[in-house]
């Protein structure tokens, strides 16, 4: 009988080559599939680092006129070709996990047309992470979708659910033996979160214009990339898509790994005076997702906000801002973990936390304070199981282009050379040292 593993290698059309890599990886897998303890690492997302994701929705938007994108993503960090180097670097720093995303459009560039080469590529990525002794943390979808999916209405229609679940099932059938942990979506609540920001509201007409221009540029009637979709319509649809994907992944993998969702969460604070919108905002942005089916919550936090009754208030005068224009607030992470733990018993992984700055000394201090917050939570018995820093590399920061620097590692945009910053070694030293004596994650 052809084993699961062989069948996959044969299906991928590279029995000999794949078989050789697979068996090397297999030994590692047996070792690392066991619970790895507290996870330390860094994260990235395909579209922000791979480069050349021509079949993705945002590529269309970046090149349509007008566009709301500052810079086209272009070659990004050329990680499509250099991911092996990136993984080796992350492992050499001392990390035991690596969070990355699979680009759906590389797997299904046209509806129903599956790229076996695309799947084989991500298989090699997973094997490489395993060979370096790290647990692969896979995001099935980090914002971008295939252009055909956005042109069909994305998640602004319930018709978007089935293709997404099919994609998640397919990935699981081919790659489940190597995955360590997974989330369906990355920050599906981001639209709800930013709808509270007074800075975003005036941009709505431009977003609409940019969507229309993208639709026109490919002769489509509409264009709905989920990251720019109407969150009021999308939210219930994406919750259903997440729950169905969760079920499908658990089933196709025989419950091999935990499947959660990662959420964008600010430390929401009541204003010093006047009415507070904290509860209303949490009810819209966080609670529906905490209540959704899933095995863990990925906490992604960058800042705090003071929340008035129907919108965030401007950042207090004089506070230190990051390059993103919001307060750089490492202490916000601890508060957010505590808030989430007050509303759910699910395990928590910090799947993103970081600061956009040119000043790497600030990043080092930020990491220390954020990690101290995680340790405080663990001491209080909160079930936190990992701290994953955003980001391994300086990368393409969506609407802000190549300006903001979130990376532990600098990228020369002409040669793509990678240069670890002091913060990379610092974060690596924290990872190697592990949790303080006497503290364990569950
Ligand atoms: C996203 C990342 C992004 C980071 C920093 C998160 O919203 O998941 O893709 O780069 O924040 O803005």
Image (cartoon, helix red, strand yellow):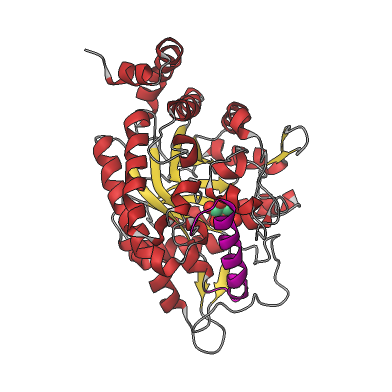
Left or right side of 179 for 244: left
Magenta residue check for 327: no
Query: x, y (%) of residue 375?
Result: 49, 52
Asked which quadrant contains residue 316, the reply is bottom right
Instruction: Answer yes or no: is residue 197 visible.
Output: yes
Q: Position of residue 292 (x, y in %)?
A: 30, 59
Which residue ends up furthest to the left in the rendered image?
1
Which residue is depicted at the point 37% across and 60% down? 157
Tell me if residue 283 comes above or below residue 442 in the rendering.
below
Horizontal side of residue 131 vs 397, given as left or right: left
Q: How many marks?
A: 0
Q: Residue furthest top?
A: 16
The percent coordinates of residue 393 (x first, y second) are 64, 41
Q: Quadrant of the N terminus?
A: top left
Dominant SS of magenta comes to: helix
What residue lies at 62% left-to-right and 34% top-to-bottom? 79
Instruction: Give left or right: position of 333 versus 383.
Output: right
Look at the image and tell me in which quarter the C terminus lies. Answer: top left
Q: Which residues are magenta?
A: 196-221
Q: Is residue 220 magenta?
A: yes
From this view, report whether residue 288 is shown above or below residue 168. Answer: below
Most foreground residue, 203 or 41: 203
Q: Point out residue 287 in the picture as x, y percentages from the top left corner.
A: 36, 67
Q: Is residue 342 visible?
A: no
The residue positioned farthest toward the right in the image shown? 414
Report the residue that reaches farthest toward the bottom. Answer: 274
Q: Residue at x 65, y 75 (%)?
A: 315
């Amino acid at each position: 009988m052809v084993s699961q593993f062989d069948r996959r290698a044969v299906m991928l059309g590279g029995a000999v080559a794949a078989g050789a890599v697979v068996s090397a990886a297999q030994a590692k897998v047996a070792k690392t599939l066991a619970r790895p303890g507290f996870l330390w690492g860094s994260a990235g997302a395909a579209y922000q680092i791979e480069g050349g994701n021509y079949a993705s929705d945002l590529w269309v938007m970046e090149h349509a006129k007008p566009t709301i994108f500052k810079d086209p993503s272009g070659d990004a960090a050329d990680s499509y070709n250099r991911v092996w180097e990136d993984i080796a670097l992350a492992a050499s720093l001392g990390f035991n996990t690596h969070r990355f995303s699979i680009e759906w459009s590389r797997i299904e560039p046209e509806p129903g047309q599956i790229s076996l080469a695309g799947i084989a590529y991500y298989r090699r990525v997973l094997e490489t992470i395993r060979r370096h002794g790290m647990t692969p943390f896979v995001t099935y979808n980090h914002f971008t979708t295939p252009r055909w999916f956005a042109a069909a209405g994305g998640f602004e229609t319930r018709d978007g659910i089935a293709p997404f679940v099919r994609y998640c099932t397919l990935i699981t059938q081919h790659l489940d033996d190597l995955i360590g942990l997974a989330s369906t979506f990355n920050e599906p609540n981001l639209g709800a979160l930013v709808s509270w920001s007074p800075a975003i509201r005036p941009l709505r007409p431009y977003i609409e214009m940019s969507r229309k221009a993208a639709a026109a540029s490919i002769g489509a009637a509409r264009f709905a990339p989920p990251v720019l979709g109407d969150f009021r319509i999308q939210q219930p649809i994406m919750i259903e898509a997440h729950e169905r994907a969760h079920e499908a992944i658990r089933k196709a993998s025989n419950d091999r790994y935990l499947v959660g969702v990662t959420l964008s969460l600010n430390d929401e604070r009541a204003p010093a005076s006047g009415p507070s919108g904290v509860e209303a905002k949490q009810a819209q942005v966080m609670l529906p997702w905490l209540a959704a089916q899933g095995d863990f919550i990925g906490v992604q936090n960058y800042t705090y906000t003071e929340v008035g009754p129907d919108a965030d208030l401007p950042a207090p005068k004089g506070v230190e801002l990051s390059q993103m224009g919001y307060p750089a607030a490492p202490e916000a992470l601890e508060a957010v973990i505590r808030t989430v733990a007050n509303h759910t018993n699910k395990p928590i992984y910090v799947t993103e936390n970081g600061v956009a700055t040119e000043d790497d000394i600030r990043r080092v201090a930020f990491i220390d304070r954020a990690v101290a917050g995680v340790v405080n939570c663990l001491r209080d018995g909160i079930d936190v199981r990992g701290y994953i820093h955003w980001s391994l590399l300086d990368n393409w920061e969506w609407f802000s282009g190549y300006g903001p620097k979130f990376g532990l590692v600098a990228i020369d945009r002409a040669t793509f050379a990678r240069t670890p910053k002091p913060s990379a070694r610092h974060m690596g030293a924290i990872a190697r040292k592990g949790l303080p004596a006497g503290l364990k994650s569950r």
